[in-house]
Image: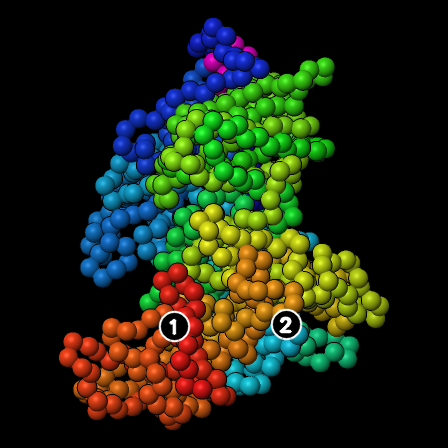
Amino acid sequence: MPPAPYRRATLVPVLAVLALLGSGRGPSGQEGGVGDPSGGEGARKLDPFLRLAAAGTSLRQDRFAEAIPGRSPRALGALPSFVRVDRRGPGPALLVKARLEDGGRTDGGASRRDSLERRLAGMGVQVRGRAGEIATLLVPVPALEAVASLPEVAWLKAAHPYRTQNEIATNSANVAADAASQIFGSKGAGVIVAVIDTGIDWKNPDFRKSDGTTRVAGIWDQTISDALHPPPAGFAFGAFYSRADIDAALAASGSLATRDGYGHGTHVAGSAAGNGRLTGGSVPAGTFAGVAPEADLLVVRVFDDVGSFCFDCDLTAAMQFVRQFAAAQGRPWVANMSLGSDLGAHDGSDPDEMAIDQMIGPGRPGAQISIAAGNSAGRRLHWSGTLAPGAVLSDTFNVAGYTPAAGPDDDFIWFDIWYKGADRATVEIETPPPAGQTTGTVVSAAYGSSSGIVCTTAGAISIDATNGPDPANGDNEVFVQIWDSGSCAPVVAPQLGTWTIRLRVVSTGGAGGPFDLWDQSELGGFAGSVPLAAASASGTVSVPGTSRNALTAGAYVSKTQWVNSSGGTSNPGATNVAGGLSSFSGLGPTRDGRTKPDVAAPGEWVGSTLAGSFLPNASGTFSERDGQHGNLRGTSMATPQVAGVAALVLAMNPALDGALVRAAIWRSALADSFTGTTPNMRYGYGKARAPGAMNEAVAIVTDLSATSSDSFTATANPFVSGYDVYRGTIPGLSAVNYGTCFAQGLPSPGFSDPALPSAGEAFFYLVVGAPVGTEGTLGTDSSGRVRPNNFPCL
């Protein structure tokens, strides 16, 4: 999330007392919750943030309470700063994620889709982007409930932003892309690598061909408007710069409005697909090349010059654009997302995760996405446990010294709590005790209720427990916000000291299920989190890295020191020894128990391309020996190397779908003394290795078909030296037995079999390529695990 809120609410004093409570305070100064104020069917499809905007909330201060009407400025002012309120039109509107059950993008659904989008337009709603059933909408606040009431709308959720995943290579010791290119003669040509990030320094020679023209196929800058460069066709925001626009600017030594003022995206793009042409001193060109240096780059800028996810920016729209761009050129693509958020369900049910999974799911050839695992393993922001009947679970968190930002609605602490839909619990927040006292003020909300805004001497507190069951996963969510609410008088920023959070278990569905809590904060203008006393490093892979179909990348230490541009040795410190997992790298499992990350790659420290605005500083501690490249760390730096490996896989076999690309990378990952037995929740399937992944890719035959009753054919791959055929009998196959070796070392994947199966049975054939004397993957099972083969030809 960005370091500063999207909106600034003015201080609104309490002007009218609508109700005087008899006491308003329970034991230990407790402020009780109020019932869910939402109304009809439409309101029930809104998430708690949108429901607050539409239906309003209450405000309690001392013994007094008042209602804050829905759609009012004060209701919008009570929203977390990550909920994006657009005030540029005649009235406020919200950026919203929706699941639209109107036929999606499938054949035959166009008429229903068009009809729905016409009705939405008639309600003042703008469709900003779409991936299958998941859409991003800009919805006028007065229309929220009406939109949610449409039968095709399954649910609406507030869109949220992300943070980059940097903390402040490609050689044979790591992903071994150089060795892979020598073996296979491919460096990613023909594949599009899309970098969704802070932009790119399109002038840098690392992104240009030997003739000086660009390797960047296009840039969609979602952060700006440019009258000379409208958005891509079909989109309503941002500016698009084509390859021709970039080449014209390069030829004329001109300029374009798009840039990378933060440097993160340029570094990421260099690791994925830079060619390392820019160099200095006696360092050979190409030394700092990325993993797939002959792939084309496509850039979507979603972060501004200070690294904040911009107001209009949207991942769903970005993915839709990338897929359509690649489809128009008939080319495979891999997207890189070195970004994430610690808030969310962490189970693949986030709207952007659902959009990702629809883009790259099984049966969608030539597409995969690499996502950062996040840098939160060491941040003490995840608390988990089991809800037992009658139990009271508690944890403390410390708000340390910070300087509150000027004005109200600027300093925030958030907790996102999830537990099983059959369980019931009351959530409490207790403020630090006043001087001379042992207890503080307690604010609570039971299942299905909201505390409203409670003004305390330690800051405003809101606990919303109305999201249960969540329509996307069936579980219960409780969202807590502590902040300097402009609705309180006086405005009080979150107080320093030790706070307590409790879960009082009311009932459970059986023995009780697990709960998980994650936190984020924006205090004093800095994005971060508050440390929990009982935190666990497990379950810290960030959203959308808990997607079901994407490749999630963890980070390990690639080096601890290096020669810098001054000829000296840089040793800024590392979180582990070289080869060991970086202590910040997000750990699995996902909340629903899946293995994440998928693989790990070098992420501490990685030398790569620097944006032009950073080159004058390339002589410092983090510089590389050529004076043109620099080192950064974070899972942001590991992610593009995994994306580059995926691009090499698709260069070998563009017919592979996302599941098979992932299987090839899983199966070829390195297990060593650092990883231990794999798969595990630290390294996933191991350390990503390009040669083995490419080997796996060329071995997979995807288009076997019958030309007659006894003859079969498929497309040969030029990198395969021979093919092996397995024949099994149905029934009789299993996950580890695809049949016996029918033919071995065939020059092509075509073969004949005049034999006939017995009555009531059928033959099943599996053809795999065998490059350099090895066999390929046998696919994956329904859980995505690679299937072993216990009866190989070799």
Q: Dot 1: what SS?
A: loop
Sequence-first disc among 1 and 2:
2
Percent position (x, y) of residue 531?
Answer: 65, 38
Residue nearest the observer in this picture, 468 or 307: 468
Magenta portion: prevailing SS class: strand
Highlighted magenta segment, given as a residue range? 59-65
Which residue is located at x 80 percent, y 62 percent? 571
Residue at 20% over, 83% down: 757
Query: Which element type, helix, strand or loop, lies under badge 2?
Result: loop
* Neighbours of disc 2 within 10 Å: few (<14), some (14-19), many (20+): many
- Pointer 1: what residue? 736
**Measured from the top left, where is residue 323 in percent x and y?**
39, 64
Q: Position of residue 39 (x, y in %)?
A: 30, 26
Residue under the image location 36 percent in, 75 percent down: 737
Q: Position of residue 554 (x, y in %)?
A: 58, 59
766 horizontally vs 419: left or right: left
From the viewer's perspective, tell me whether residue 552 is left or right of residue 783: right
As drawn, 732 above or below 392: below
* Amino acid tagged 1: Val
Query: Which of the 4 image quarters holds residue 718?
Result: bottom left
Q: Nearer the viewer, residue 555 or 10?
A: 555
Q: Which residue is mark 2?
A: 174
Question: How would you rate the neighbour count of disc 1 (Cα within 10 Å): few for under 14, some for 14-19, many for 20 or more?
Answer: few
Mark 1 and mark 2: Cα distance apart in space: 31 Å
Q: Is residue 372 visible?
A: no
Q: Which label belongs to residue 500?
A: none
Which quarter of the rendered picture does the N terminus lie within? top right
Measured along the vertical axis of the image, is residue 89 above or below residue 772? above
Tell me which amino acid carries mark 2. Asn
Image quarter (top left, top right, bottom left or bottom right) of the C terminus: bottom left
